[in-house]
Image (cartoon, helix red, strand yellow):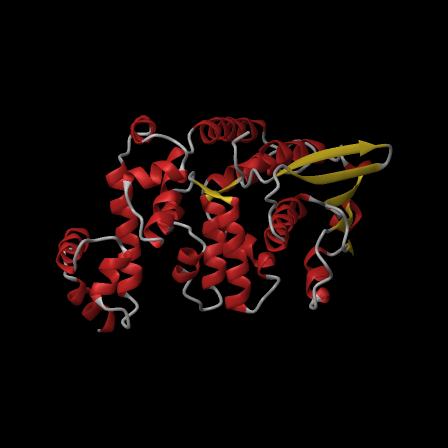
Amino acid sequence: MTNAPSVLASWVLAIDRGIQSYGINSEPLLEKAGIDSMLLKQHEARIPLANTNKLWHLAVQATGDPLIGLRIPEYITINTLYAVDAAAQASETLRDLLISTCRFSQVATSGVELTLMEEHNLCQLRFDPQYKEAPCDESMDAFLATIFATIKPVLHFPDRFFCSIQVARARPIDFERYEKQFGCVIKYDRPQYIIDLNARLLDEKLPGANPEISRFSEEVLTSYLARFRDQDIEMKTRGAILSAINEGQLSKCDVAKRLNMSVRNLGRKLNEVDITFSQLVDSIRQEKAISLIKQSNICLGEIAFQLGFIDTSSFCRAFRRWTGMTPGQYRETLSS
């Protein structure tokens, strides 16, 4: 287990697209949440759960929709998460599907662990928090909705398999929409999230059973889990750099202190994953610069200051290197 809960970047990308579906620019929200948007293009990268929770809260404020999590399954694209779905839907029985879902649930987030509990005719899919920082209600809504979207299509009688859901959240104002989403009894204000299932149907054969696809997907996911548990230094360093830039304290020494390591050790660990500190700083500055340039009310001097450049000229040279244009020319292309 890693020393802090994290979320798959492609899961956060689905959140980002969900926010945009309301006609809202998600870039300022990502920045306020301390999430480097460049990471969303790296589908196997990890993002701290604490930052993702901040993004959820900002998304609710911006959209005015406290049930935004229910929409997220619509925006999951072909990436690492698809391997989780493929492994599940290619399973031979419902029991195999649930075991596969539990085994690879931490691909999406390491903040909770899914466990299948069976006792007589009672069967539960339990969501056990693994850290003090637990996924927020909106995140759990999205998690539940994704599991239902994965399992329901392979069931002959979904209303017989899903008996009820126990949720830790309070009953939302728009509870009818919430309950319609899942199509079963919802029990609110419970100690933890649990899906109650019909154990008699666990050995039901699935029409999409495919041992080859199941085996291939499991190999991909097992390999990914091994990599993410051992190599999260780039994600942590990006987060520390972004925080340092936002606080106006950007230096390799400051970032190393934030990560509780020496400058030499930080350089060595980054070298192991074939990237340098300066490359990370440059990519983060580029992303933030483009985001700030789009806000026409912010002058170039202020942008240079926010990004940690010594003067406007240095910023303009860097911007030309990134885009082939000066900041002024870039703004003109946006306005035209």
Given residues 13 and 292, the one toward you in this image is 292
Instruction: Look at 48% across and 61% down and name the residue there.
Output: 19
- The quarter of the displayed image where residue 1 is located: top right
Residue 69 image point, x, y percent? 58, 57
Q: Can residue 14 be seen in this view?
A: yes
Decide: is 56 above or below 1. below
Image quarter (top left, top right, bottom left or bottom right) of the C terminus: bottom left
- The quarter of the displayed image where residue 236 is located: top left
Q: Is residue 205 visible?
A: no
Residue 117 image point, x, y percent? 76, 33
Decide: is 185 above or below 268. below
Residue 252 image point, x, y percent? 28, 39
Whether residue 90 sits left or right of residue 259 in the image: it is right
Whether residue 321 sits left or right of residue 229 in the image: it is left
Decide: is 8 above or below 182. above
Residue 108 image point, x, y percent? 54, 41
Given residues 9 and 276, the one toward you in this image is 276
